[in-house]
Amino acid sequence: MGFNLMDTDDRDEKRDELADQFKRLTHEALGKDDTDSFIEVLLQRNAIIERIMEENVEVVLKEEERLLFIEMEDKILKRLEGLKEDVFEELTKISDKRRAIRTYSPKFPFPSMPAFFDKEG
């Protein structure tokens, strides 16, 4: 059982490639103003995270990079929290409208339905 330097180099290259893709997509997501584009980039980034976890790749960051990524992750989480609040607010509005429609019973200017029909005629 020998130590193969090529395997180590390949692993380091794969680690660097995945780390670079993750960094690029993180920066790209934070630069998106449009919500749909933001979410699309985060989904692409999630695929990279899954590959990193599947392949058990250890991403090594310098202390300053680590702090920068923690800050960027915090910004992403805050933006997602804001989007979640917007969705819940919109769902509440829709729910209130549906409730109002169900409880509405028209009284004016229309008379009750039996007045429109003559039972004798």
Image (tube, grey):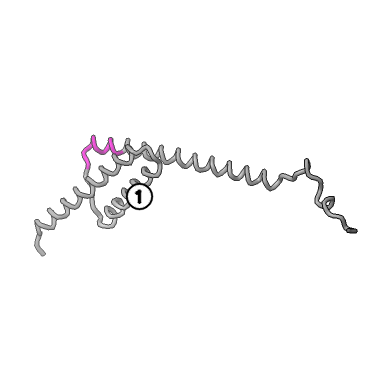
Q: Residue at the right extreme?
A: 120
Q: Main secondary structure of the magenta part?
A: helix
Residue beneath disc 1 = 43
Q: Amino acid at mark 1?
A: Leu
x then y, percent, for residue 47: 31, 53
**Quadrant of the drawing holding the N terminus:** bottom left
Q: Residue at the bottom extreme?
A: 1
x then y, percent, for residue 77: 39, 40
Residue 53 picture quarter:
bottom left
Camera-nearest residue between 61 and 16: 16
Q: Residue at the front extreme?
A: 121
Camera-nearest residue between 84 and 90: 90
Residue 25 lies left or right of residue 115; in this view the side is left
Residue 1 lies left or right of residue 23; in this view the side is left
Identify which residue is drawn at 87% across, 55% down.
118
Identify which residue is drawn at 25% across, 55% down.
56
Residue 15 lies left or right of residue 86; in this view the side is left
**Magenta span includes 64:** yes
**Quadrant of the drawing holding the C terminus:** bottom right
x then y, percent, for residue 32: 34, 39
**Magenta span includes 106:** no
Q: Give the crowd class for mark 1: few <14, some 14-19, many >=20 residues within 10 Å.
A: some
Q: As displayed, is residue 2 above or below residue 30?
A: below
The segment highlighted magenta reads 61-69
Camera-nearest residue between 6 and 48: 48
Residue 3 picture quarter:
bottom left
| SS category of the residue bearing label 1 | helix
Counting the numbered discs, the total is 1
Identify which residue is drawn at 32% across, 35% down.
71
Residue 114 lies left or right of residue 8; in this view the side is right
